[in-house]
């Protein structure tokens, strides 16, 4: 059995699966919704583990049809645990161990780089999405996002830390969000910039399914159809250029040598990105305007004699 397929199956189970004891014995299950029949990821998972049954759909108005893979015999669950156990994260490993009453094969996480990306692909197939958000300041523009939520009883879910590590430390893990009701608190791993989203998709691409690929292609098609937004403050001219748009020499605009404060002991060389002479001129203009406003306000408040 190919190790990358097993790593993918472990990631998919880490995202969507569970194992536990039931009234009739033991059971392991993976749920997946799909609008077009049995999801391909469930068929792929079933083919990798080689046991269990595919069932569904469960139809509920207003929601996508629900399908699932299920194993309900101890030998079948033991086979699944032995196959994908080395790549599972601690939560699902513990579920299998409690269900079977024995230890699983030794964990291999962190595995090789390609196996970790295969695990990330399975986890993303189960939990992740690529979508568009409206640009905060430019109407009509959109920005891409990679997004994976995960709940955890304590701290940050290990799965999110592992996902971030497998994808070259891309993105950020948010603070805890508390949705209220019966839903558990969760955190989100998100990737924000177009370049980082493209790199994340490049790393995931060999291991994700057609649904996530199609979703990401639609998102990036919109992003690539947009003209690039201008960066920086146009008033400062081209970043790094010696002369600003007003003709000031930015390289020699600093009056006093840089003196660090606290941890910042090295010159950040902001004077190469913006013109300090323009900054001083604008600051003087604001002070003059503020002083004029203060005098006018005092004049209005003075008593009439």
Image (cartoon, rainbow, N blue to C red):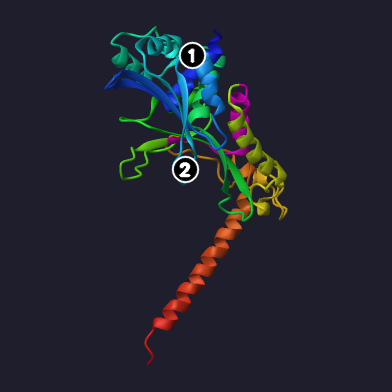
The image shows residue 7 at horizontal and vertical percentages of: 50, 15
Which of the numbered marks, if any, corresponds to residue 49?
1
Give the mark nearer the N terminus: 2 vs 1: 1
**What's the magenta region?**
188-206
Give the left or right position of residue 210, taking residue 245 as reference. Answer: left
The residue lying toward the viewer, choosing from 197 and 292, is 197
Q: What is the secondary structure assignment of the residue under circle 2?
A: loop
User: Is 263 rendered above or below residue 227?
Assistant: above
| Residue occupying the point 49% across, 40% down | 64
The image shows residue 78 at horizontal and vertical percentages of: 38, 10
Is residue 160 part of the magenta span, yes or no?
no
Q: What is the secondary structure assignment of the residue under circle 1?
A: helix
Give the left or right position of residue 24, taking residue 281 as reference. Answer: left
Q: Quadrant of residue 220?
A: top right
| Residue occupying the point 51% across, 24% down | 42
User: Is 157 rendered above or below residue 72?
Assistant: below
Residue placed under numbered mark 2 in the picture: 63
User: Is 18 rendered above or below residue 274?
Assistant: above
């Amino acid at each position: 059995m190919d190790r990358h397929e097993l790593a993918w199956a472990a990631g998919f189970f880490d995202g969507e699966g569970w194992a536990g004891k039931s009234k009739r014995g033991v059971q392991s299950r993976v749920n997946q919704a799909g609008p077009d029949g049995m999801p391909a990821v469930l068929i792929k998972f079933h083919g990798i583990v080689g046991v269990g049954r595919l069932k569904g759909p469960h139809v509920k108005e207003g929601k996508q049809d629900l399908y699932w893979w299920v194993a309900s015999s101890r030998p079948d669950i033991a086979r699944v645990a032995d196959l994908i156990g080395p790549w599972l994260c601690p939560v699902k490993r513990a579920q299998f161990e409690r269900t079977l009453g024995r230890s699983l094969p030794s964990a291999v996480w962190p595995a090789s780089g390609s196996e970790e990306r295969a695990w990330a692909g399975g986890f993303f197939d189960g939990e992740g999405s690529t979508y568009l958000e409206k640009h905060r300041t430019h109407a009509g523009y959109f920005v891409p996002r990679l997004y994976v939520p995960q709940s955890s009883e304590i701290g940050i879910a290990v799965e999110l830390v592992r996902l971030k590590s497998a994808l070259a430390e891309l993105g950020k893990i948010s603070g805890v969000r508390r949705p209220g009701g019966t839903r558990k608190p969760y955190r989100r791993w998100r990737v924000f910039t177009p370049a980082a989203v493209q790199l994340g998709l490049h790393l995931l691409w060999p291991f994700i399914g057609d649904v996530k690929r199609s979703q990401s292609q639609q998102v990036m098609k919109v992003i690539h159809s947009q003209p690039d937004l201008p960066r920086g403050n146009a008033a400062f001219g081209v970043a790094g250029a010696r002369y600003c748009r007003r003709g000031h020499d930015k390289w020699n605009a600093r009056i006093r040598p840089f003196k660090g404060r606290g941890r910042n002991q090295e010159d950040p060389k902001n004077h190469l990105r913006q013109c300090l002479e323009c900054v001083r001129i604008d600051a003087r203009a604001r002070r003059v305007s503020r002083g004029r406003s203060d005098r006018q306000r005092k004049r209005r408040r003075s008593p009439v004699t």
